[in-house]
Image (spheres, rainbow, N blue to C red):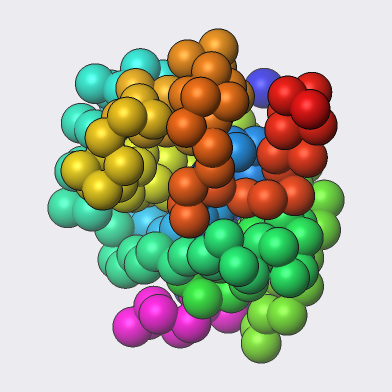
Amino acid sequence: MALDWGFEISFRVNGETVVCGCDEAGRGPLCGPVVAAAVILPEGLVIEGLDDSKKLSEKKREKLYNLIRENCIDCAVGHAEVYEIEKHNILGAAMLAMNRAVEKLSVKPELVLVDGNVVRGFEMRAVPVIKGDALCPSIAAASVLAKVARDRLLDETEKLYPNYGFAKHKGYATKLHREAILNLGASQLHRPSFLKKLLGEKK
């Protein structure tokens, strides 16, 4: 099943017309914040090439990022930092980032469609959509914005922590990244709870 406005519209009840898609990036990495985006698209808008961000190349995501921002009604990005991931666990932090993204919207949605199977804390009606980033245009757009925004943040951290390779692996547990942690130790950007197994192996 591909992106389908009809599928997205099917979630609306009681005349809801202002709908935003919400998704996050960064649940799996060993470091950095989890970043969420909220996007309100004009109903029926077709953005050529739009898809789940995980299926797209970096070049395509960058191009779509600009197209989404140029054509959306409104969009916003929210973060949950490493200390919040440690405090609330990664799911709780992802929900926190999503809520922050929605709260930053200038146009307030009547319905939030959230990628996944959990919703928490939204002031308006929110509906989880499993695999929503591959089904709903608004969620797909949010997935692209969240991924590009997080990747750009990790590119910037390369300047602060030049020996970890953040710009290459974006914080994921690649061989390069694991070896850097074992050689250099954890940075302030790393998530302690995500490193227990790796650092345990070092001992």
Q: Quadrant of the N terminus?
A: top right
Q: Is residue 20 above or below residue 100?
A: above
How many discs mark residues in the rendered view? Answer: 0
Q: Residue 94 sits in which quadrant?
A: bottom right
Left or right, 199 with respect to 200, comes to left
**Residue situated in front as seen by the camera: 36 or 158:** 158
Q: Position of residue 23 (x, y in %)?
A: 56, 51
Q: Quadrant of the C terminus?
A: top right
Where does the magenta region start and end?
Answer: 102-112
Residue at horizontal 26%, vertical 35%? 162
Q: Residue 42 sits in which quadrant?
A: bottom left
**Residue situated in front as seen by the camera: 173 or 27:** 173
Residue 33 painted magenta: no
Residue at horizontal 57%, vertical 60%? 82
Residue at horizontal 60%, vertical 68%? 83
Left or right, 133 with respect to 199, comes to left
Q: Position of residue 29 (x, y in %)?
A: 58, 37
**Residue situated in front as seen by the camera: 81 or 143:** 81
Residue at horizontal 66%, vertical 61%? 85
Q: Residue furthest front?
A: 203
Q: Residue furthest bottom?
A: 123
